[in-house]
């Protein structure tokens, strides 16, 4: 039976016709009260019974429209979940669901859970899992309406209540990819609802009424989302499990520490993924310090305690890098981005066919954009392979941002593309019409380069953009000042002022001194030193700059500039430090490149030898020796004879 299911779920498109020939007729039972009404012709139907009949007829019509291959898939999917057959559940989730979605439901919804309930004997647990997939499909492929947003929240509450409030661990086995997607989608829908709720100007009267009700105020609240994640971590004792593993305790000791829930793979992985989810939620809410603090027991390396999906590593590195970027720890952010991007490039062959491949690529491209911003704010030596991709994709933007104030619009555009869509923890006052009306007044632009009048002053993304833009603007004099100081070893302050006052705007020595202090401050920052991070040019294997035993917030003041100076009276003394090339990494990379080129040359077929017709004729009809190759004269390097 297992082989038949594998063949069905992994069937090629040309086998679907054979599968559709099989009828799956499962009658939808009528309510008993409705059947009794049919027996009495004198009985008049009330409004409720009439609606029940209409609903039943519509349900029967919807059930009849489901393709037989989809019915068979749902039946087998349900049986695999009941049997806790992890292999078949994984195949159905990653292959069957995706393939049937592309063929039948690419632009429409899957059948509702009530419609397919007869196929699964009205199994409420499976229907909850089915609704989780159903609403995820609506959010990713279609446009959810306000009812979808509220119903997806209700289904998430039912799922987590079942997992957290059951008597003991639930008898359920789901693959790691699905468990991660449950946590990831839960946070995404929370973010989507927060963005939807923050725009009262575009709401209809019905939507305003729903959002102003008591249920609307509680749906997708920050408190409920954080409560779910912290409850999963506490129930699974994920932090205690990570600490025990880091301390090298035995399996028996770890089982005693984590209890009955922590020993179950379902709860263990949900707890671990909830820690990653907390990192993302705190980043969305703008609490970057707390976001890094919750990751202290996890670290930022790829050495996960089990085979975690690639999307977990990418999401972790992206949000941790955003934290470092917003905390002005630019070198740490660059090392985190470079580490995971290098790892993704090495493991690309293993996840190119994954259903998460598109999402991984989108997140990776955002990290490349953030690396371009890091390179502008604090140029540091990073892996050449990654930086080559950054220059290839964002070389023009890097050049424009290097021109100072002219590059502000480019900086803001790249930041808005690369940063997450930040949200506000508080809802607009939908229950107070007066306060809500004051929010609908047209706002003013929030940045010098912004010309969009629809930008809301309370938008958290715009607040973070203003903070990043102000930091960028404060560093605009550094580029020209640095390029000028590199030409000298010592320079008189008055002469330096004259060089900088090219426009005749009256730049005085005090203003130049303030610029130099900005340059001095920009050359130092708090960073993690000697933590096993990726060395430039790939000399060390990457662990993304952290170990679980170390706090991600720890660091020391260090210099990130290759130019230093001191001011003695009216003289500026400059010292430039150059970093020598790391020959080991350079040699290894170029040796690998040469080996790949040689292999490709060996694998290529030799071109056919073509002799011109005239040369052939001369060789055949000409005088003796004419047209024959010369055998005398000076030989050249490749073995022929040099022709005068």
Image: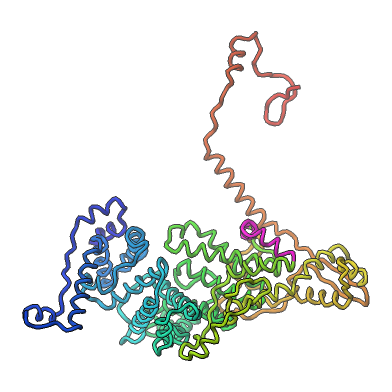
Residue at (63% x, 54% y) in the render: 588
Instruction: Decide: is 1 above or below 612.
Output: below
Which of the 4 quarters of the picture holds residue 490? bottom right
Q: Is residue 248 visible?
A: no
Q: How is the image coloured?
A: rainbow
| Whether residue 78 is situated above or below residue 106 in the rendered picture | below
Q: Position of residue 58 (x, y in %)?
A: 22, 71
The magenta region covers 385-403
Q: Residue at x 69, y 19 (%)?
A: 631
Task: Say above or below: 171 vs 119.
Answer: below
Secondary structure mainly formed by the magenta segment:
helix
Q: Nearer the viewer, residue 120 or 80?
A: 120
Give x and y (percent) for residue 284: 53, 78
Residue 461's x, y, as percent? 58, 76
**Residue 123 is at least partly visible in this image:** yes
Residue at 26 percent across and 74 percent down: it is: 114
Asked where in the image residue 331 lies, by quadrant, the reply is: bottom right
Q: Is residue 147 left or right of residue 516?
A: left
Residue 576 pos. (x, y %): 82, 66
| Towards the viewer: 541 or 216 | 216
Q: Is residue 565 left or right of residue 388?
A: right
Q: In the picture, which quadrant includes the C terminus?
A: top right
The N terminus - image quarter:
bottom left
Residue at 11 percent across and 83 percent down: it is: 44
**Magenta-span inclusion, residue 60:** no
Which of 279/394 is in front?
Answer: 394
The foreground one among 420 and 311 is 420
Q: How many marks?
A: 0
Q: Is residue 474 left or right of residue 484?
A: left
């Amino acid at each position: 039976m297992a082989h038949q299911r594998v063949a069905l779920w992994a069937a090629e498109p040309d086998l679907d016709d054979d599968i559709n020939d099989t009828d799956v007729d499962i009658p939808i039972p009528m309510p008993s009260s409705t059947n009794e009404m049919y027996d009495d012709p004198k009985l008049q139907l009330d409004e409720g019974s009439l609606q029940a009949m209409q609903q039943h007829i519509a349900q029967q019509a919807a059930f009849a429209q489901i393709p037989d291959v989809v019915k068979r898939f749902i039946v087998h999917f349900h049986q695999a979940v009941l049997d806790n057959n992890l292999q078949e559940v994984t195949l159905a989730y990653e292959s069957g669901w995706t393939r049937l979605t592309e063929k039948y439901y690419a632009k429409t919804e899957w059948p509702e859970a009530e419609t397919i309930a007869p196929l699964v004997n009205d199994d409420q647990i499976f229907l909850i899992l089915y609704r989780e997939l159903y609403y995820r499909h609506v959010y990713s492929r279609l446009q959810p309406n306000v009812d979808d947003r509220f119903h997806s929240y209700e289904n998430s509450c039912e799922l987590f209540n079942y997992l957290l409030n059951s008597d003991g661990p639930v008898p359920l086995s789901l693959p790691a990819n699905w468990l991660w997607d449950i946590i990831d989608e839960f946070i995404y829908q929370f973010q989507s609802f927060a963005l939807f709720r923050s725009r009262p100007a575009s709401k209809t009267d019905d939507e305003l009424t729903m959002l102003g009700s008591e249920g609307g105020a509680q749906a997708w609240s920050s408190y409920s989302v954080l409560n779910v994640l912290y409850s999963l971590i506490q129930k699974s004792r994920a932090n205690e499990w990570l600490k025990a593993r880091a301390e090298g305790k035995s399996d028996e000791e770890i089982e005693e520490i984590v209890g009955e829930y922590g020993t179950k793979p379902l709860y263990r992985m949900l707890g671990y993924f909830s820690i990653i989810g907390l990192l993302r939620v705190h980043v969305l809410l703008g609490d970057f310090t707390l976001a890094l603090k919750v990751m202290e027991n996890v670290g930022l390396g790829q050495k996960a305690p089990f085979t975690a999906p690639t999307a977990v590593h990418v999401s972790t590195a992206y949000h941790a890098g955003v934290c470092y970027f917003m905390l002005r720890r630019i070198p740490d952010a660059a090392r985190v981005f470079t580490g995971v991007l290098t790892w993704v490039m090495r493991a690309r062959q293993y996840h190119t066919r994954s259903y998460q491949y598109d999402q991984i690529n989108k997140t990776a491209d955002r990290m490349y954009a953030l690396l371009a911003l890091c390179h502008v704010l604090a140029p540091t030596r990073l892996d050449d392979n990654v930086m080559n991709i950054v220059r290839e994709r964002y070389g023009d933007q890097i050049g424009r941002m290097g021109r100072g104030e002219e590059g502000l619009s480019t900086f803001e555009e790249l930041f808005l593309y690369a940063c997450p869509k930040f949200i506000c923890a508080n809802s607009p006052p939908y229950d107070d019409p007066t306060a809500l009306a004051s929010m609908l007044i047209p706002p003013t632009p929030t940045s010098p380069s912004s010309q969009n009048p629809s930008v809301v002053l309370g938008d958290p993304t715009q607040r973070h953009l203003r903070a990043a833009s102000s930091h960028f603007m404060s560093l605009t004099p550094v580029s020209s000042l640095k390029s000028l100081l590199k030409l000298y070893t010592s320079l008189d302050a008055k002469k330096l002022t004259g060089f900088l006052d090219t426009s005749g705007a009256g730049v005085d020595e005090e203003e130049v001194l303030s610029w130099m202090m900005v340059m001095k401050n920009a050359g130092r920052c708090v960073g993690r030193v000697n933590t096993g991070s990726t060395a430039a040019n790939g000399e060390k294997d990457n662990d993304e700059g952290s170990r679980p035993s170390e706090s991600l917030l720890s660091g020391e003041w260090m210099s990130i500039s290759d130019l230093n100076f001191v001011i003695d009276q009216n003289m500026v003394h400059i010292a430039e430090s150059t970093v020598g090339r790391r020959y080991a990494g350079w040699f290894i990379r170029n040796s690998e490149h040469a080996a790949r080129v040689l292999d490709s040359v060996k694998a290529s077929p030799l071109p056919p030898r073509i002799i011109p017709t005239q040369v052939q004729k001369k060789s055949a009809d000409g005088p003796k020796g004419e047209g024959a190759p010369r055998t005398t004269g000076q030989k050249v390097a490749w073995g022929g004879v040099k022709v005068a």
